[in-house]
Image (spheres, rainbow, N blue to C red):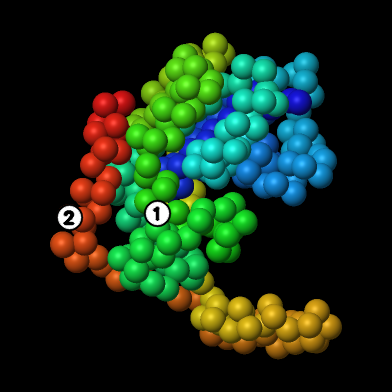
Amino acid sequence: MKCNLIIPGFAKCGTSSLHEYLKMHPQICMSKPKEPHYFSNDERYKNGYAYDAIFPGEVNKYTYFGESSTTYSVWEPALARIKKDMVNPKLIVIVRDPLERLLSHYRWMYALGAERKSLGAALEAERRVIPSPLLSRKGCYAWYRRCSHYSYFIPIMQALFNPENVLLLKSNDLRADPQQVLDRCVEFLGLDQLDISNRVVRVNETADKRVHRLSGLGEYFSKLPPGVQQVLSGPKNLVKDLLGEKKLVAPEPSEELLAEIFELLSDDIRFYESI
């Protein structure tokens, strides 16, 4: 197995940007696609998914082969599989203020058209559903509280892989000073320093997200027989082009709900502040 570097970041914490910065280093080969979710996808893991093929570099050319699947950070079986299959891997985990992260996650899902509930109702729905990597919405997960539960998941990573093999970073630091954060990463990995002072990465910004005005009908279209979909694909695309795109803005939570969420995340906030 080529992979020896995992970025099990939590959703909306800057994992995509960190992936791109690491990819700039000549001694690191990052996966393509970025998020294969190999260790959290039962079918891929058990049925011989060509995992090594997503790392295009030659073994003798790179020191590290890495990938960045956010499901790993909050899915215990995935972490156990990484522990079983990899020899002394390095983990770089990037986190964000837990409350800020939860709100950003909810707004992102809403902007994506993958969430329609109020935040309070969404949190209650999450509490009632047994978490599973199979339950994605447009490739994302409505794991709002779960993805801010640092005080539970990070100690699991540290226990499995040893604290010296787990680097913890903050997304605010990455945004404010990418060079300093990359310096920390390469020092952690024992690699040569790399100057990225003139290279700024911003990906998956919630404010930039737009959806087609036809997005509601797209769900019904996907349920049609394949032959019918093929016949209607031309008219569908024409209507999409004519209608254009729209920005979906999530409803703002009340002060009372924010206070409840703050209390819910109190252990995670303390854990975050201790980093």
- The residue nearer to you, when weighing 155 against 4, is 155
Where disc 2 sits, the SS reads: helix
According to the picture, the residue beneath numbered tag 1 turns out to be: 144
Within 10 angstroms of label 2, few (less than 14), some, or many (20 or more) residues?
Answer: few
Please tell me which residue is depicted at 54% across the width and 33% down the height of the picture: 7
Within 10 angstroms of label 1, few (less than 14), some, or many (20 or more) residues?
Answer: many
Rendered view: 190 above or below 75: above
Q: Which mark is first along the chain, 2 or 1? A: 1
According to the picture, the residue beneath numbered tag 2 turns out to be: 259
Q: Position of residue 108 (x, y in %)?
A: 42, 60
Where disc 1 sits, the SS reads: loop
In the image, what residue type sits under mark 2?
Answer: Ala
Q: Are marks 1 and 2 in contact (CB under 8 Å)?
A: no
In the image, what residue type sits under mark 1?
Answer: Tyr
Specify whether 38 is left or right of 213. Answer: right
- The residue nearer to you, when weighing 56 against 222, is 222
Specify whether 225 is left or right of 246. Answer: right
Q: Position of residue 2 (x, y in %)?
A: 74, 25
Q: Position of residue 94 (x, y in %)?
A: 43, 34
Please tell me which residue is depicted at 48% across the width and 70% down the height of the picture: 113
* C-alpha gap between disc 1 and disc 2: 16 Å
Image quadrant containing the N terminus? top right
Image quadrant containing the C terminus? top left
- The residue nearer to you, when weighing 265 against 196, is 265
Rendered view: 238 above or below 4: below
* Residue 194 appears in view: no
Please tell me which residue is depicted at 17% across the width and 55% down the height of the picture: 259
Specify whether 181 is left or right of 21. Answer: left
Please tell me which residue is depicted at 78% across the width and 33% down the height of the picture: 52
Which label was assigned to residue 43? none
- The residue nearer to you, when weighing 199 against 94, is 94
